[in-house]
Amino acid sequence: MGAILVARLPLNWKLSRLYGLLGLTPHKNKNHHRGLRAHLLRLAMNVYLNNKRLGINAELLRDLEGLSPKKAVYKLQLRIVRILKKAWQQQKQHLLAGGQ
């Protein structure tokens, strides 16, 4: 699931524009990419439910324990986008530094 997000998300955009593309900004217009949003939602739900079911207590979900499932999944979606953006930036810097 995550591979589709990495391949299709324009990670060179600012985070605010990525959030807008995915419909993660509240009270904005409804012009967002429904397919990418659906993939992100499924990924976040999968991570959230597996953590609950298996009791993994992942670092990613530590402070989401007291929230309702809807809010927890929303915050998890924001974190996933931030993580993808950060990984893309680190990979770009590695390539610019002459890495393979």
Image: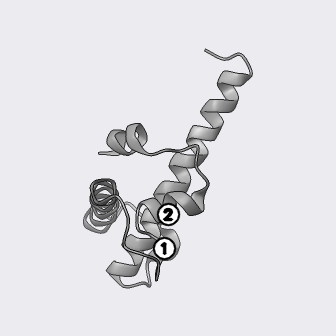
Tell me the number on the disc at residue 36: none
Left or right of residue 16, residue 57 in this image: left
- Which element is circle 2 on? helix
- The amino acid at mark 1 is Thr
- The amino acid at mark 2 is Tyr
Q: Residue at x 46, y 75 (%)?
A: 64
Q: Residue at x 55, y 59 (%)?
A: 17
Residue 81 percent coordinates (x, y): 49, 55
Give neighbour class at mark 2: few <14, some 14-19, many 20+ (Cα, 10 Å). some
Q: How is the image coloured?
A: one colour
- The image shows residue 39, relative to residue 26, as above or below, that is above
The quadrant of the image that shows the N terminus is: top left
Left or right of residue 36, residue 59 in this image: right
What distance separates the C-alpha of mark 2 from that of mark 1?
6 Å
Give neighbour class at mark 1: few <14, some 14-19, many 20+ (Cα, 10 Å). some
**Which residue, given by chain and number where applicable, does mark 1 sit on?**
25
Residue 99 percent coordinates (x, y): 66, 17
Q: Residue at x 52, y 74 (%)?
A: 63
Q: Earlier in the sequence, mark 2 or mark 1?
A: 2
Tell me the number on the disc at residue 19: 2
- The image shows residue 76, relative to residue 87, as above or below, that is below
Whether tag 2 and tag 1 are in contact, CB under 8 A, the answer is yes
- Which element is circle 1 on? loop
Is residue 55 or residue 12 the one in the foreground?
12
Is residue 61 or residue 42 the one in the foreground?
42
Left or right of residue 38, residue 58 in this image: right
Residue 90 percent coordinates (x, y): 64, 36
- The image shows residue 17, relative to residue 69, as above or below, that is above
Left or right of residue 51, residue 62 in this image: right
